Image (cartoon, coloured by chain):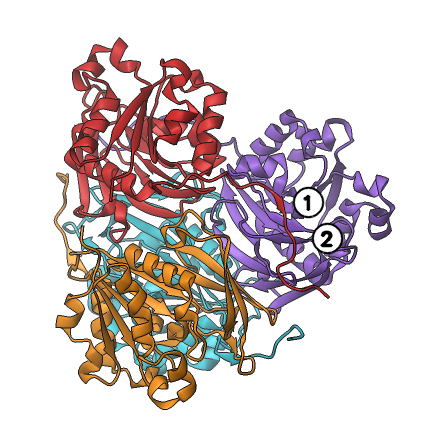
Chain colours: A red, B purple, C orange, D cyan
Amino acid sequence: MALPRLLVWNEYRHELQNPDVSAVYPDGIHEAIAAPLRQRGFPVSTATLDQPEHGLTDEVLNGADVLLWWGHKAHEDVSDAVVERVRRHVMGGLGLIVLHSAHYSKIFRRLMGTSCSVNWRVHGTQGENERIWVTAPAHPIAAGLDRCIEIPQEEMYGEFFDVPEPDELIFVSWFKGGEVFRSGLTYRRGYGRVFYFRPGHETFPSYHHAEVQKVIANAAAWAAQPGVRRTPPDNARREPLEKMG
Amino acid sequence: MALPRLLVWNEYRHELQNPDVSAVYPDGIHEAIAAPLRQRGFPVSTATLDQPEHGLTDEVLNGADVLLWWGHKAHEDVSDAVVERVRRHVMGGLGLIVLHSAHYSKIFRRLMGTSCSVNWRVHGTQGENERIWVTAPAHPIAAGLDRCIEIPQEEMYGEFFDVPEPDELIFVSWFKGGEVFRSGLTYRRGYGRVFYFRPGHETFPSYHHAEVQKVIANAAAWAAQPGVRRTPPDNARREPLEKMG
Amino acid sequence: MALPRLLVWNEYRHELQNPDVSAVYPDGIHEAIAAPLRQRGFPVSTATLDQPEHGLTDEVLNGADVLLWWGHKAHEDVSDAVVERVRRHVMGGLGLIVLHSAHYSKIFRRLMGTSCSVNWRVHGTQGENERIWVTAPAHPIAAGLDRCIEIPQEEMYGEFFDVPEPDELIFVSWFKGGEVFRSGLTYRRGYGRVFYFRPGHETFPSYHHAEVQKVIANAAAWAAQPGVRRTPPDNARREPLEKMG
Amino acid sequence: MALPRLLVWNEYRHELQNPDVSAVYPDGIHEAIAAPLRQRGFPVSTATLDQPEHGLTDEVLNGADVLLWWGHKAHEDVSDAVVERVRRHVMGGLGLIVLHSAHYSKIFRRLMGTSCSVNWRVHGTQGENERIWVTAPAHPIAAGLDRCIEIPQEEMYGEFFDVPEPDELIFVSWFKGGEVFRSGLTYRRGYGRVFYFRPGHETFPSYHHAEVQKVIANAAAWAAQPGVRRTPPDNARREPLEKMG
């Protein structure tokens, strides 16, 4: 059975403007996310903000089973029309994996209906250690993991994370500075599956971390419904299925 | 302890235009909803679509602990500015009870992030019977109910109901014509509590039904956080709580 | 990738004692469940109550990724030792699919912690029609289904179904006689995944129904963690992971 | 409206045998839990392990709306008959608040269906600091709390906490040594409501902590269904509610 087709979207501006970021992700965060997925055999394409239509035409979206999304400082530059287009594809069955600072992306906020705000901190230039604990070891997204994932350097996100109660809570993060964060969350929206995963600050090498890569691959397999793209749900009048009196 | 302050909002157009509706609800659906709540001792005020600002100024909203919302054919006439205002109050702690066709209101769709679409049918002039089964008998919204509520005449709503998986599923409806529907659903959004309750087609006397009235009263008590209205959650930078290395 | 190894367990007494049952399931309910799974390529073995140790030795259980369980009138004849053995395998990662009247099996009640009781009725010799509605169309267990599954003849199970709130509600059933039932439910227990699926009264041909077969196959794939069988969770003392003051 | 009647059950052995415990809780942990509840106006009685029938006769249980349970080293000394009696009361509507090491009590394990095991550590004689973060600020159990509760000295409990996915996740704890823990969890079982709350190691003064006391009082109000004690759910045959063909 062919593996699902993945599409990695990246804002791709930090890397072009900030040498501290390009030092960590010389080919862009999208390529860092895509490479280990390709190694696992997934067909992976990429798209970025400054391409025409942000690289997200209907044709491109139809060619993907799962969309992975990284954005940070330019959420407002994503056009509402493209956000609406992506939303319709998710409602129709496209999987969506929302990474790190994309908690504040237009598409995630739109799908959640809440502010999706967090408490946050980048501690100095070194960040702080994050330890991602598995709270749902039987879930396919946690397959192959040990009790926790150690990440030496990260930005902190802390509760209250203003999202709806997730369908499933897969991970909870511990931070050196004293906070916790629900860092792996699943949701179903329309006919689509959505996963939020926390790590991935642009100045730290989290996407080079083998266990982070494993989670992203697990999530991509979980979110995919290959060959399924329905018309999103809509109000419809129906005749009775039973004989009425 | 004083009972929470309730605000019943109604589109209030069917009743003024359609004698079949005003025959059932001569003072408007809002007054039919408000009366039994007043009898239970709740302080209840009302607001309607065609009042200035739809009757929903910040001052009015600040004076309520729970907002009940009925709308049907004029969802699009509710201004986006007022929807955003109500949304901010809900995120800040205002309870929200969404009734029947308000599944398709701007405010509910905005808070859910999905289409909130349903399958539906009004069978002839008599409708069909709905039987609302209790699936969470230990929940305060189901307090005092028997196994089910019998409603002789209603419009049908059937699955798939395109809403997020609820925090709690309280009721499931059976319809004569062959459908089922998740008809009592709780959600938390920001600092607020939201409840969707299905019955209430404008040509049928569901809001005169004693058990329906009991559920609405239970839900109002459940959704209220009297005296709580916080600034809605927002991103915030935080200093470490622990000494960092 | 090899498909998961399935083990179908059946009480297998009705079929030997009641010609009305053997007329529908001449080779036993276990073979009726197993055959369409084998057709899909799953390696399937079977076990029955009256075999030594009910056919469920540690060796047999270790050889399975998912156990499917049908029982009805002899729940009390299943030995507590075997129930405890199965429970430990589930806690360690064995998938479990609980079918129809096995809602009242020792293993399901033990894993749920509730009575798992239902309201029920067999209407005459023909039963009544059940319509299984999909409430979670994006879930892998509902893959390939239309809006609902029509089953012409079944026993009725009605709410209140005394089980814990499921992790995910996949199906809700409608019954001709007026009841609804949460008929497809997922749970995680320890390191294992559990799915309850309602249809399957012994005198009706539900396991010959193509859509019922599809759901069972979907559920088997969902519940399986091939190659995973851990030591079930247990209390453990741990040293700090961080330097303590 | 009268406040619900509370019954605090304590193992009450540490306090009689270990001066380090009696120094912190001279009148027993049960009295430390009861006192601030009485101050809030709740009628509170107590019962302990070494009373006849552990102080938990049907008459005593019928006189309570909510039972609070603290146990640690003598779980096995609680008779199965009393556990079954308590279970039936919970299934019939008695609220149950399970505190700290009672995660491993017979009654909690029986109601959960899992091992309820944890990872744990008492760090030296001083313990370590726990910070209980609020993840559901709109929930009544979190009413009146700030973002988190600081507890200077506690035993550590860490994930994986082998319990079913809760109905609602209210709190997540951070520990100095590097772990996180889901520390406030709600469940419905039968007609009853259950809340697990983590803090309360016997050598540390957590039950003298004002915010811990507030949570326990909130939880008692939430779990209570005054005047409700039903026959627990049981299988029942039912006639059709609709005319059958």
The reply to whether residue D200 is visible in this rendering is no
Disc 2: CA contacts within 10 A as few (<14), some (14-19) or many (>=20): many
Q: Is residue A63 above or below residue C212?
A: above
Comes first in the chain, label 1 or label 2: 1
* On screen, residue D161 above or below B50: below
Are both tags, 1 and 2, on one chain?
Answer: yes
Which numbered circle lies on residue C3? none
Q: Would you say the residues marked 1 and 2 are in contact, meaning their CB atoms lie under 8 Å apart?
A: yes
Element carrying mark 1: strand
- Per the image, label 2 sits on a secondary structure element best described as helix
Q: Nearer the viewer, residue A15 or D74?
A: A15
Give the residue displayed 45% in from the left and 74% down from the top: C117
Q: What's under tag 1, amino acid-wise?
A: Leu
Q: Which residue is denoted by mark 1 in the rendering?
A: B6
- Chain for disc number 2: B
User: Where residue B161 sits in the image (x, y, percent)?
Assistant: 55, 48
Q: Amino acid at mark 2?
A: Leu
Judge the density around disc 1: few (<14), some (14-19), many (≥20) Cα neighbours within 10 Å.
many
Rendered view: D157 above or below A157: below
Q: Which residue is mark 2?
A: B37
Q: Residue at x 41, y 53 (%)?
A: C142
Q: Determine whether, in the image, residue B83 is placed left or right of residue B15.
A: left
Which of the pair A117/D238 is nearer the observer? D238
Image point 52% across, 39% down: which residue? Answer: B112
